[in-house]
Image (cartoon, coloured by chain):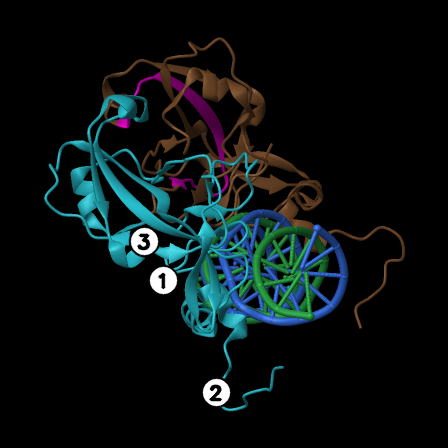
Chain colours: A cyan, B brown, C blue, D green
DNA sequence: ATACTTTACACCTAAGTGCCAAAG
DNA sequence: GACTTTGGCACTTAGGTGTAAAGT
């Protein structure tokens, strides 16, 4: 259960270690994010509950991993991370970021394509992998304090919000 | 007459606007930096004068423009800038930076290759363009105050050294 | 001693964080 | 009125500047 925000990266990022590729062949790695169901949600009494039918789907976009294309050998050498994938709720986005609806549930999908060239993508066969545990609800403001704390604790850019030990300050 | 420093970028950067390419074809853009003559220089009485034979040449490296390969159409759309090219005087450099000898004169060269793939580079035909006015002497410390000021005035990262015009005051 | 080189440093750019007040 | 969204902010990482002092 992960979250999203205005125009920001997905965090934590999707990471995968790849094996079984042809060392010599070229591959392209992609990720897209599709609706997990056709519901709109709200956060009530500490949990996400259905709050009606989903809003119309946003234009679909495919994120191409920036190292693409690379050889199987190169992909298998290191963990493949999609931390640079950017999410936005701006329908008129011109950057090619992935557009999502706030308060909707989403499922990232990982695509592996054997192709030497981006231009050949439309004619290539995809292998698509879905990891159910990466499902998340998109939001514009955090609803769950535990998620906030998880991000503060783990995202290096949020280090400024880490409570340096003892003095817990009051918030109201 | 431009300068260089420890492990730093080349500044001002080499920039070119390209035209006449085949829109559909893929191209790779490269830059290397070769000795302009076989002399060692020193800066004396406000000018560079020859001070003996050149030191042995450094290992040659070819900088591949990070957007490579791209289609002719993509290259022609924007100014092609080599501002990320890095220079060093460290002979054992492992990053692939361009290695130069301090106090020697150099000539950048721009290479245009019609090739869809970096692996095909060795078998491809290069078109090489040299602009004499981009010749420079490599240094580890600036010799000419005008060069220093030119950099301070134009390099955004050196803004901290700009005199904010009126009212020169000493630091408190 | 002179001339050049290295290093730590303050000051920048550029971009990714959650927060909070204001707006919708 | 309760909820959601926006935009400015201080904070962070990451890395590019010339400087001055120290090193060779």
Q: What segment is highlighted magenta in the picture?
A: B98-118
Of A51 and B13, which appears nearest the observer?
Answer: A51
Residue D8 horizontal/vertical position (percent): 72, 57
Q: Tell me where residue B71 appears, x and y as whole percent.
A: 40, 19
Q: Which mark is residue B47?
A: none
Residue placed under numbered mark 2 in the picture: A165
| Mark 1 → mark 3, Cα distance in angstroms | 13 Å
Residue B94 shown left or right of residue B171 in the figure: left
State the residue position of label 1.
A1
Q: Chain of mark 2?
A: A
The chain letter under disc 3 is A
Q: Quadrant of residue B34?
A: top left
Kindly report the secondary structure that dominates the magenta region of the rendered protein.
strand
Looking at the rendered structure, which numbered label has been put on residue A14?
Answer: 3
Distance of label 3 from label 2 (alpha carbons): 30 Å
Query: For the residue carrying disc 2, how many other residues have a C-alpha within 10 Å: few (<14), some (14-19), or many (20+)?
Result: few
Residue A31 x, y percent position in the rendering: 32, 42
> Which of pointers 3 and 2 lies earlier in the amino acid sequence?
3
The reply to the same-chain question for discs 2 and 1 is yes
Q: Is B110 included in the stretch rendered in magenta?
A: yes
Residue B54 visible? The answer is: yes
**In whole angstroms, how far apart are the C-alphas of marks 2 and 1?**
27 Å
Q: Secondary structure at mark 3?
A: loop
In this view, the mark in front (1 or 3): 1
- Between B24 and A141, which is closer to the camera in this rendering? A141
Name the element at disc 1.
loop
């Amino acid at each position: 259960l992960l979250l999203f925000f205005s125009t920001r990266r997905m965090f934590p990022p999707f990471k995968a270690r790849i094996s079984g590729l042809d060392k010599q062949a070229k591959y392209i790695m992609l990720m897209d994010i599709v609706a997990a169901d056709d519901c709109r949600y709200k956060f009530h009494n500490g949990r996400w509950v259905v709050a009606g039918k989903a809003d119309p789907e946003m234009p679909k976009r495919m994120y191409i991993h920036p190292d693409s294309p690379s050889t199987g050998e190169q992909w298998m050498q290191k963990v493949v991370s999609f931390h640079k994938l950017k999410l936005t709720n701006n329908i008129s986005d011109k950057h090619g970021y992935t557009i999502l609806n706030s308060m909707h549930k989403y499922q990232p999908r990982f695509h592996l394509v054997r192709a030497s060239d981006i231009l050949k993508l439309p004619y290539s066969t995809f292998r698509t992998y879905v990891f159910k545990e990466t499902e998340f609800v998109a939001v514009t403001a955090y609803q769950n304090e535990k998620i906030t704390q998880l991000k503060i604790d783990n995202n290096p850019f949020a280090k400024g919000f880490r409570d340096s030990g003892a003095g817990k300050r009051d918030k109201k």
